[in-house]
Image (cartoon, helix red, strand yellow):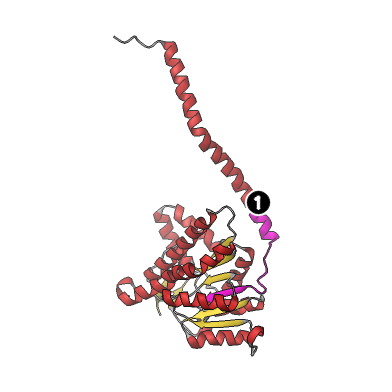
Amino acid sequence: MEAAQQPGNRSSSNGVQTSNIVLDYLPIVTKVVVGVLHSIYAFINLAYVTIFPVEKSLKDKVVVVTGAGRGLGREMSYQLAKEGAKVVCVDINAEGVKETADVINGGRTGADAGADFYTTNVAEPSQVNELAKAVEEKWGKVDVLINNAGIVASAPLMDTTDDQIKRMIDVNLVSHFWMLRAFLPAMKKRNEGHIVATSSVAAFTCAANIVPYAATKYGVTGLMASLREELRANPSNNIKTTTIHPFFLDSAPINVKHWEVKSALPIVSIPQVAQAAIQGIKREDVVVTVPEILRLIMQILWIVPQKSADYWRDAFSSKINKA
């Protein structure tokens, strides 16, 4: 028969177990404490750089902008040119993208021209690879890549055709992969560059009648977040990323009505979003939301109970109907 464990032995055993538990959890507790202190520092630093921002210059930087034939892409191209950047305008719309470049150049040609243009379907990898080769041969390098091309449409899911869904996914999401695979290797080789993507506030929330559109914007947001992590795996990485999340744009100035939006919040103008995007690029912000307060509001909706989230969405969210 085994001898009964003496009280002293039990006390010693309990002490050893407690000690082992403390040692097991000590690294986690240490990380939590350090994390809290780091978060406090990050908030203080955020307040400081907000008051005293540091902005890099875009003068003479080569910037590729997809979807530059009209709308937000065109306006970003115009504002980038005012910053002194060399703008490479890309769009499937040959007439529109040429017009954008012509306005920027204002009659200037050759080395004096501030913009160039390419007619490219960014959803086709072969055309994207040809684009990257042509841009590299002419401009030498790309400092900033802005993946902005996109299709905007609204309709109930079952009223959307197979081709419409596929085309939206190809242009709004898959094209980002082709552009990254074509332009990122050169940036990695130089360990320098800036990748920008136009997503949407739709990536932070949900709405009826834009199921394919919202899905692509969730995808773009996840792509950019994961790409940043992949780049951060290199301790000396110097390639920046910025994701733009605008609220619903006022498309009246370009005479295009993608959908009918009824919102308790004001829609934003194309110049307003372009200005915020370029400011975010210059400040190397990881995420830019227009207006900025919406990012906080949408994140709160993720943590409140579902019934509460539904109430707030019903009270303040946008109602989107087919145009």
Number of disc labels: 1
Q: Give the class, few, some or many, for how many residues have Cα within 10 Å of label 1's Cα (few <14, many ≥20).
A: few
Disc 1 is placed on an element classified as: helix
Taking the image as shown, residue 283 lies to the left or right of residue 164, namely right
Q: Quadrant of the N terminus?
A: top left
**Residue of label 1:** 44
Please state which of residues 300 and 111 is positioned toward the viewer in this rendering: 111
Q: Is residue 26 above or below residue 93?
A: above
Among the 4 quarters of the image, the one containing residue 172: bottom left
- The one nearer the camera, 100 or 315, is 100
Q: Is residue 305 above or below residue 173?
A: above
**Residue 88 picture location, percent across and down:** 57, 78
Q: Does 45 lie within the magenta span?
A: yes
Extent of the magenta region? 44-65
Tell me: 288 left or right of 11: right
Q: Any magenta on residue 133?
A: no
Q: Residue at x 54, y 67 (%)?
A: 186
Instruction: Give the residue drawn at x 64%, y 55%.
Output: 46
- Where residue 99 appears, x then y in whole percent? 55, 87
Q: Is residue 299 above or below residue 97?
A: above
Q: Residue furthest bottom?
A: 107
Q: Among all residues in the image, which is located at the extreme right?
A: 52
The reply to whether residue 199 is visible in this rendering is: no
Q: Between 211 and 76, which is closer to the camera in this rendering?
A: 76
Is 23 left or right of 51, judged from the image as shown?
left
Residue 318 spot, x, y in % from top left: 45, 69
Question: Could you say which is closer to the camera, residue 137 or residue 22?
Answer: 137
Residue at point 44% right, 70% down?
A: 178
Residue type highlighted by circle 1:
Ile
Q: Quadrant of residue 108?
A: bottom right
